[in-house]
Image (cartoon, grey):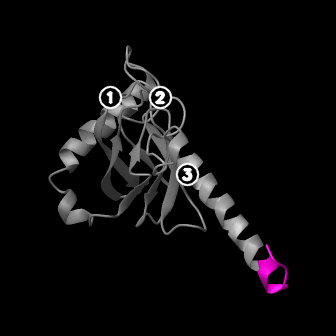
Amino acid sequence: MRLGKATVLGLVVGAATFGMAAPAMADPGDVIVKPAQARPGDKVTVVGKKCQVDGEAGSLAFVGGAVPLNGSEEVDGRAGLATIKKDTFPGTYTVLVRCGAYRATGEVRVVDGKARPMGQPTPTGGAATGLGGGTGGSDTALLAGGGVLLLGGIGAGAIAVRRRNGAVA
């Protein structure tokens, strides 16, 4: 068995046996995975909030099975960067953190990474949300009526200005 698979198998067996004692050992939220939802191939940050020494985090969803957790000034505890395997099926995966004698579990949710199933069209253009009445064709009768009213208003304004000046129309 390859070393990576042996590590994953050890982490899974450890998580299974550790699962019964986990509530007594670690509080929920001791392991943070950001983002908590990822697609295959995405990178996630795993944080062991109560880790006092460097350790590792492992999951069946991670490339290589386990990633090192190191100290960082930006986070409380230890953090590491993991990549979700490209062939991971959608679902919720357990993340086991080990730092010395400290153990805790968290979760990462893997969502479907496929763009579109075969046979479905790819959307193009803008969203069909509409622009009120601005997307329809022009109504010639309304445009003509508006033009007549506009010209009539201009003509009435010209007559009114001429009469004020004392000129006879």
Q: Distance between the residues labelled 3 and 1?
A: 63 Å
- Bounds of the magenta segment: 161-169
Residue 139 is situated, as x and y percent measured from the top left of the image, at: 51, 41
In the image, 41 versus 95, the foreground residue is 41
Answer with mark 3 or mark 2, whichever residue precedes in sequence. Answer: 2
Give the residue pinned by disc 1: 89
Q: What residue type is labelled 1?
A: Phe
Q: Residue 145 carries which label?
A: 3
Residue at the extreme left: 20
User: Are the two marked residues, 3 and 1, in contact with CB atoms closer than 8 angstroms?
Assistant: no
Q: Callout 1: few (<14), some (14-19), or many (20+) C-alpha neighbours within 10 Å?
A: some
Task: Count residues near mark 3 (Cα–Cα under 10 Å), then give few for <14, some for 14-19, many for 20+.
Answer: few
Q: Residue type at mark 2?
A: Pro
Secondary structure state at the residue bearing disc 3: helix
Q: Identify whether 32 is placed above or below 95.
A: below
The vertical placement of 1 against 78, above or below, is above
Local secondary structure at mark 2? loop
Measure the alpha-carbon separation of dots 3 and 2: 40 Å
Where does residue 48 sit, x and y in percent of width and height? 42, 59
Q: Secondary structure under badge 1? A: loop
Q: Which of 75 and 136 is in front in this view?
A: 136
- Compare marks 1 and 2 and give the one earlier in the sequence: 1
For label 2, the crowd category at 10 Å Cα-Cα, with few meaning under 14, some 14 to 19 and many 20 or more, is: few
Number of numbered discs overlaid on the protein picture: 3
Q: At x 58% / y 54%, what residue is drawn?
A: 146
Residue in the foreground of this view, choosing between 151 and 166? 166
Give the residue type that dot 3 points to: Gly
Rendered image: mark on residue 123: 2
Image-quadrant location for residue 116: top left
What x and y, as percent, mark residue 127?
A: 47, 40
